[in-house]
């Protein structure tokens, strides 16, 4: 009986030994890292963030793809003693939001500030503020008196920004309503400001938008370079290099403080201007030379 | 595979039976199924490919339509507006192939449907954007109606690659896409394929037929040429090709040349054999197994006519016995008698050879025979002639001896009468002796005539003159019941001979003719020229071919039997009663005619009459006037005569008579002594009487030796046999005349005087 018990114990020890060997051999995550960066490294802003952190902060860093941390992020953070988690992109942010409150999270490459009950979090969002666009419109395209926009269900704060009488706003629950709204705005606005509404900007609604834009002769403004390429008059887009540095500085700030409490999310510090002169010509809109000088790229 | 092979084989055989067995047809028989199979396979493959292409195209169209529908359905579904959905359905239904359209929400609840009623929708996963089910009549397309969004916020700022966007299902549009177009297209393809297969088969079949026609044309020519060869023609063919067919054609030409040459030689050979078969003097024939005559040559037909049965030809025994003998090999060179075409009996030597089949049964006979009737007649005639010749020799010998005896009797009787008084009894006795001896002399003369020893004088004669003289005599002497009809050819050539003998011969024939007509009748005498050209006749009568004078003596009497005909020329053979004939008449005629180089032919029919034909060789020249010379009295004639004769009595008689006529006579008992005596007295001898028949040295030899000593000396030939053939040679050499024993003193002195004058 006693020998049998000894044999069972011996087997258990051998099993544990093999399990440990297997764990250490297969898990690079075993390396200790103070900063965990989750993001798609093929994206330039993600690389800029990683480079900045590695170059400027004296902390060890681990970089993960979002799909690599799915369901494991807590373990990674807990096992390595992570001081800050940098979530770049909405998917990575979604995983990061699941972390305990104690783990400070810095986010980036999301459209708008995170509206969450979690307090130990801060970041830089990508959306260009409406005011910035209106500033450009008023300065360089004064003829565009009325600017319409349609916001989605999650952008109620924009509705609150109706301070300017220049804006004509509508709410849409889906792409159909978006199109319907655009159609409704057709005759009442001089331009349409395109907000970064992922749920509304389906391929169909975008095509219909531009069809209505060109048929109704009201230019679309925003949202990014690719929309300018599609026919938008101009767009103000965050500068990617500046965005990386800005996120890196936010990480540094959180590391220095030990947490992110009280740190407000910030918009981009620097914008690039993209201009489509052919749309301007089609819309018979004069493009000022100063604006063209400011443009990072002019299409076509 | 075996049933297919056997089916193809039987099909080819039936086609061959029905349409002939040619390479072209075989090629078509082989090519056409191949073409049909190839066309079918090609059509099937084309159909399959076309169907696949069509299906892919339709599918693509359906996919495009589905994609379009999904795009079209996005806003109507999102809006939930029935009008929008109806509009989308109407747009989709505008596509001809769309038989039905239905819209569903994301939970597969039917929103609206138009067109054919489709089966209940299936539950589909949301991540599938297009699901196609296929029924026999249509494609059942389920296209996901989705919204396409950016997957990440950053994607709003960056270009996203295709497929990276996020597609969210909003509902489904279900389209019934008709396959009518595919089915119609398939039908068109099948129809086209069938037409193409038919045209292809027809064109390739025609092409194959033409190609094989061109390729096998030389073979067809060869075939036709060979068919013509079978019919006996030898057409030339020309194939301008160096391939195997060309070589075959040139070989054919060489073969045809060889065959033509061979056949020509064969034809010539066959013609020669056929000519020989029909010209040969042997009767040749072929029989079947039952003795029926299958083939015969000209000679056979000539001799036998055209009898159906070989066996019916024979006179003796059953004809079938010959066939049995032939089968056993015992019927070769057999002498037989058959009934000829004219009903006469023919003597033949026949051989019959059987032909056997593989079982040893006689299936026919080949045979031939030779007509030996003439040969037999010739043999009989020769035997008869030899018999007559023997009798003649015998009779001649007897007559010679008798003549010598009678010469003595007559001579001394006449000498005795010269020295005794006419009134004495002795003179009367001598007269009786002389007359008796003279009768005996007549008998010997007749015997000598038969023995051809009696031609005393040779001169050119007119047969017509002799006959006319005879007719005058006959009309005076014959009974009036005998009408004598003479038919004499004018311009009849002369003959050479003794007129008295010929007269006597014709007289004897006429007497026999008269005796054959005891109740009277007509006696025809006819003279004519006759050209003897038949070799057999010439051989039969032992005379040369040439022109003859023919004297025919015909009676309408009782005729003769064959037996009588065979014996009529034998001496002492007579059908007349005792004392009515000596039996030497026709023998003498025979001897006289033969002695004149002619021959005599007898034709007689019992109850109808007899024709005796005498043939005398014609001669040329002019007939001299017959001189009737008188014996001159020569008692006052003088001269020296050498008498050479081995018969003492004759020699002494002659010496007595001639000395009585004042001639100086020298004698010699045989030829050698005669030559010696002549040699001793050759200057004084005026005439030599020379017996021609002597022992040791004959008269002919003595004649030559005396002539050699004194060419101009006169020599009178003397013989008891009569004038021999070789005497002509001596006459040509200058012989002064011929003295026939027995002679009387008048005859001797006459001949001597005549010779002394020459």
Image: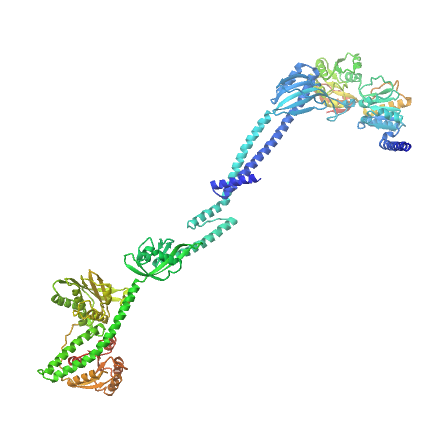
Q: Please, which residue is most extreme toward the left here?
A: B423
Residue B354 vs B454, above or below: the answer is above
Residue B445 vs B299, above or below: the answer is below
* Percent x, y of residue B463: 18, 68
Which quadrant of the figure has residue A199? top right
* Percent x, y of residue B675: 26, 84
Colouring scheme applied when the structure was drawn: rainbow
Could you say which is closer to the camera, residue B454 or residue B493?
B454
User: Which quadrant: the C terminus of chain B?
Assistant: bottom left
Residue at figure coordinates x 58%, y 29% from the top left: B186
User: Which quadrant: the N terminus of chain B?
Assistant: top right
Could you say which is closer to the camera, residue B603 or residue B439?
B439
Could you say which is closer to the camera, residue B278 or residue B567?
B567
* Percent x, y of residue B177: 63, 23
Q: Is residue B272 visible?
A: no
Which quadrant of the figure has residue A152? top right
Q: Please, which residue is most extreme toward the bottom here?
A: B680
């Amino acid at each position: 009986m006693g020998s049998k018990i000894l044999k069972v114990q011996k087997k258990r020890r051998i099993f544990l030994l093999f399990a440990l060997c297997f764990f250490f051999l297969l898990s690079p995550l075993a390396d200790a890292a103070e900063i965990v960066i989750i993001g798609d490294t093929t994206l330039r802003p993600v690389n800029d963030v990683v480079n900045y952190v590695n170059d400027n902060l004296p902390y060890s860093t681990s970089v993960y793809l979002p799909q690599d941390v799915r369901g494991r992020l807590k373990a990674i953070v807990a096992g390595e003693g992570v001081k800050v988690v940098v979530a770049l992109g909405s998917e990575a942010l979604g995983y990061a939001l699941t972390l305990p409150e104690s783990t400070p999270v810095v986010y980036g490459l999301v459209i708008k500030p995170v509206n969450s009950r979690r307090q130990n979090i801060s970041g830089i969002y990508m959306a260009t503020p409406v005011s910035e666009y209106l500033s450009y419109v008023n300065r360089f395209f004064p003829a565009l008196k009325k600017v319409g926009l349609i916001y989605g269900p999650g952008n109620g704060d924009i509705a609150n920004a109706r301070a300017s009488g220049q804006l004509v706003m509508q709410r849409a629950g889906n792409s159909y309503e978006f199109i319907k709204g655009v159609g409704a705005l057709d005759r009442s606005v001089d331009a349409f400001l395109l907000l970064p509404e992922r749920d509304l900007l389906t391929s169909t609604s975008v095509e219909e938008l531009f069809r209505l834009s060109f048929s109704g002769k009201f230019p679309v403004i925003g949202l990014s370079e690719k929309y300018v390429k599609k026919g938008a008059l101009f767009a103000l887009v965050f500068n990617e290099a500046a965005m990386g540095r800005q996120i890196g500085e936010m990480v540094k700030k959180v590391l220095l403080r030990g947490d992110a409490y009280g740190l407000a999310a910030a918009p981009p510090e620097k914008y690039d201007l993209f201009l489509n002169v052919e749309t301007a010509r089609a819309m018979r809109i004069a493009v000022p030379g100063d604006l063209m000088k400011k443009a990072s790229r002019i299409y076509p | 595979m075996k049933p297919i092979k056997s089916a193809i084989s039987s099909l080819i055989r039936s086609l061959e039976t029905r349409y002939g067995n040619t390479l072209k047809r075989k090629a078509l028989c082989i090519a056409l199924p191949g073409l049909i199979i190839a066309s079918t396979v090609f059509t099937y493959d084309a159909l399959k490919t076309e169907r696949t292409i069509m299906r892919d195209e339709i599918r693509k169209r359906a996919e495009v339509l589905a994609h379009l529908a999904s795009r079209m359905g996005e806003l109507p579904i999102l809006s939930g507006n029935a009008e929008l959905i109806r509009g989308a359905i109407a747009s989709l239904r505008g596509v001809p192939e769309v038989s039905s359209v239905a819209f569903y929400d994301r939970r597969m609840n039917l929103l609206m449907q138009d067109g054919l009623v489709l089966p209940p929708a299936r539950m589909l996963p949301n991540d599938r954007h297009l699901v196609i089910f296929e029924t026999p009549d249509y494609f059942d397309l389920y296209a996901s109606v989705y919204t396409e969004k950016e997957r990440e916020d950053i994607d709003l700022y960056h270009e996203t690659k295709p497929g990276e966007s996020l597609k969210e299902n909003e509902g489904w549009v279900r389209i019934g896409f008709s396959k009518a177009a595919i089915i119609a297209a398939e039908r068109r393809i099948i129809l086209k394929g069938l037409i193409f297969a038919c045209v292809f088969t027809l064109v390739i079949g025609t092409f194959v037929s033409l190609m094989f026609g061109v390729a096998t044309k030389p073979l067809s020519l060869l075939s036709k040429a060979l068919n013509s060869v079978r019919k006996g023609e030898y057409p030339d063919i020309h194939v301008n090709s160096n391939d195997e067919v060309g070589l075959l054609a040139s070989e054919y030409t060489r073969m045809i040349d060889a065959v033509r040459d061979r056949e020509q030689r064969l034809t010539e050979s066959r013609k020669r054999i056929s000519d020989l078969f029909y010209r040969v003097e042997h009767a040749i024939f072929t029989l079947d197994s039952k003795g029926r005559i299958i083939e015969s040559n000209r000679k056979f037909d000539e001799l036998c006519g055209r009898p159906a049965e070989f066996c019916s030809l024979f006179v003796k025994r059953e004809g079938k016995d010959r066939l049995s003998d032939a089968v056993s090999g015992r019927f070769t060179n057999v002498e037989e008698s058959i009934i000829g075409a004219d009903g006469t009996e023919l003597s033949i030597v026949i051989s019959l050879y059987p032909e056997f089949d593989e079982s040893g049964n006689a299936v026919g006979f080949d045979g031939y025979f030779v007509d030996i009737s003439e040969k037999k007649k010739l043999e009989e005639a020769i035997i008869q002639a030899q018999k007559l010749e023997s009798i003649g020799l015998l009779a001649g010998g007897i007559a010679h001896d008798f003549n010598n005896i009678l010469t003595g009797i007559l001579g001394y009787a006449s000498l005795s009468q010269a020295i005794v008084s006419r009134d004495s009894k002795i003179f009367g006795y001598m007269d009786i002796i002389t007359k008796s001896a003279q009768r005996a002399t007549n008998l010997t003369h007749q015997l000598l005539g038969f023995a051809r020893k009696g031609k005393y004088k040779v001169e050119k004669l007119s047969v017509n003159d002799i006959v006319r003289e005879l007719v005058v005599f006959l009309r005076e002497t014959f009974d009036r019941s005998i009408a004598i009809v003479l038919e004499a050819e004018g311009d009849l050539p002369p003959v050479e001979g003794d007129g008295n003998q010929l007269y006597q011969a014709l007289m004897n024939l006429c007497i026999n003719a008269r005796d054959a007509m005891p109740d009277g009748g007509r006696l025809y005498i006819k003279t004519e020229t006759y050209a003897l050209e038949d070799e057999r006749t010439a051989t039969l009568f032992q005379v040369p071919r040439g022109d003859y004078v023919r004297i025919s003596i015909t009676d309408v009497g009782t005729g003769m039997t064959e037996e009588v005909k065979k014996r009529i020329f034998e001496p002492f053979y007579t059908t007349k009663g005792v004392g009515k004939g000596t039996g030497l008449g026709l023998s003498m005629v025979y001897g006289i005619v033969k002695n004149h180089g002619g021959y005599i032919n007898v034709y007689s029919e019992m109850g109808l009459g007899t024709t005796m034909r005498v043939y005398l060789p014609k001669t040329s020249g002019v007939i001299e006037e017959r001189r009737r010379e008188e014996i001159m009295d020569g008692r006052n004639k003088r001269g020296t005569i050498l008498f050479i004769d081995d018969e003492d009595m004759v020699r002494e008689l002659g010496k007595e008579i001639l000395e009585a006529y004042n001639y100086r006579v020298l004698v010699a008992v045989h030829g050698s002594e005669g030559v010696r005596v002549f040699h001793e007295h050759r200057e004084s001898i005026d005439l030599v009487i020379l017996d021609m028949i002597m022992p040791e040295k004959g008269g002919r030899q003595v004649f030559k030796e005396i002539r050699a000593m004194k060419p101009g000396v006169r020599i009178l030939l003397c013989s008891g046999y009569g004038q021999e053939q070789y005497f002509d040679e001596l006459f040509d050499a200058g012989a002064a005349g011929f003295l026939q024993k027995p002679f009387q003193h008048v005859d001797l002195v006459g001949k001597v005087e005549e010779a002394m004058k020459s």
